[in-house]
Image (tube, rainbow, N blue to C red):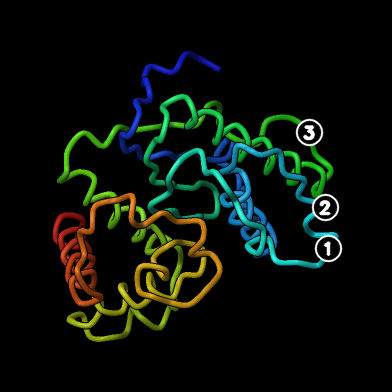
Amino acid sequence: MGIRTIQFGDDEFYHIYNRGVDKRIIFNDNSDRQRFVNLLYLANSKQSIDYREIKSKNQSIFDYEIEDKIISIGAYCLMPNHFHILVRAKEGVNVNKFMNKLCTGYSMYFNKKNDRSGALFQGRFKAKYADSDEYLKYLFSYIHLNPLHIDKDPTTKDRPSDNLSVLDLYHAKEYQWSSLLDYYGVNRQELKILDIDEFPAYFSSSKALDKELLDWINFSVENNP
């Protein structure tokens, strides 16, 4: 699998990501995506948790109370063949523990469901250290704007060009499988995945977040015509 060169430090911020082996699709449908989102919550615990036992009680995964999270999650996004997670390490060693629980649990589920065997992900997960305030702030936009790479309503190509940035932002804000909805105050259980108070409060309001995202959308368009 190779040797990881990054060393996770206590109370530091990291961008975690990985993709399917051979760039394969790892989320075939919404049930797959929901399973991964559920595991984002359940894997973040020092406790040993039996997923099937919780489901057998016909209770929501998010009704289960995690007493002692091992890392803090600030943002996430699921794409068809990869994922992104922004984390803050409580103890550096726990990043590896969390990712092992998350990826092993999801791989076992996916392989059983699809009658396959072998590795699902492309080796070890990747990690980048957020070594500056500027970069950490940028990661919130980068992660949450990933859905713009997914095919959108083809009719948008016929819309006036000066509206396209707003339409892109609308698309990102409608995407269910990222944490952006939680930053806009949508009432949903997935908010329990996040530890927003453990991350800098870069965006004082929804309007401030809108402006930040639109600035990055426009920057991307201008630099990738």
Q: Nearer the viewer, residue 125 or 53?
A: 53
Q: Secondary structure at mark 3?
A: loop
How many other residues sit within 10 Å of disc 2, few (<14), some (14-19) or many (≥20)? few
The residue where tag 2 is placed is: 53
Amino acid type at mark 1: Lys
Q: Secondary structure at mark 1?
A: loop
Amino acid type at mark 2: Glu
User: What mark, if any, has residue 1 been given in the picture?
Assistant: none
Q: Is residue 180 above or below residue 184?
A: above
Whole-Å distance between the Cαs marked 1 and 2? 7 Å
Q: Earlier in the sequence, mark 2 or mark 3?
A: 2
| For discs 3 and 1, the disc positioned in front in the rendered view | 1
* Image location (x, y in percent) of residue 95: 47, 32
Q: Can you tell which quarter of the image residue 133 is in?
A: top left
Q: Can you tell which quarter of the image residue 37 is in?
A: bottom right
Q: Secondary structure at mark 2?
A: helix
Q: Are marks 2 and 3 in contact (CB under 8 Å)?
A: no
Q: Nearer the viewer, residue 138 or 81?
A: 138
Q: Are marks 1 and 2 in contact (CB under 8 Å)?
A: yes
Instruction: Locate the N terminus and report the quarter of the image it occupies.
Output: top right
Q: Nearer the viewer, residue 1 or 46?
A: 46
Left or right: 202 in relation to 8? left
User: What mark, if any, has residue 117 been given in the picture?
Assistant: 3
What residue is rendered at 24% in x and 52% in y? 200
How many other residues sit within 10 Å of disc 1, few (<14), some (14-19) or many (≥20)? few
Q: Nearer the viewer, residue 53 or 222?
A: 53
Q: How many marks?
A: 3
Whole-Å distance between the Cαs marked 3 and 1? 29 Å
* Image location (x, y in percent) of residue 86: 38, 46
The residue where tag 1 is placed is: 57
Q: Earlier in the sequence, mark 3 or mark 1?
A: 1
Whole-Å distance between the Cαs marked 2 and 3? 24 Å
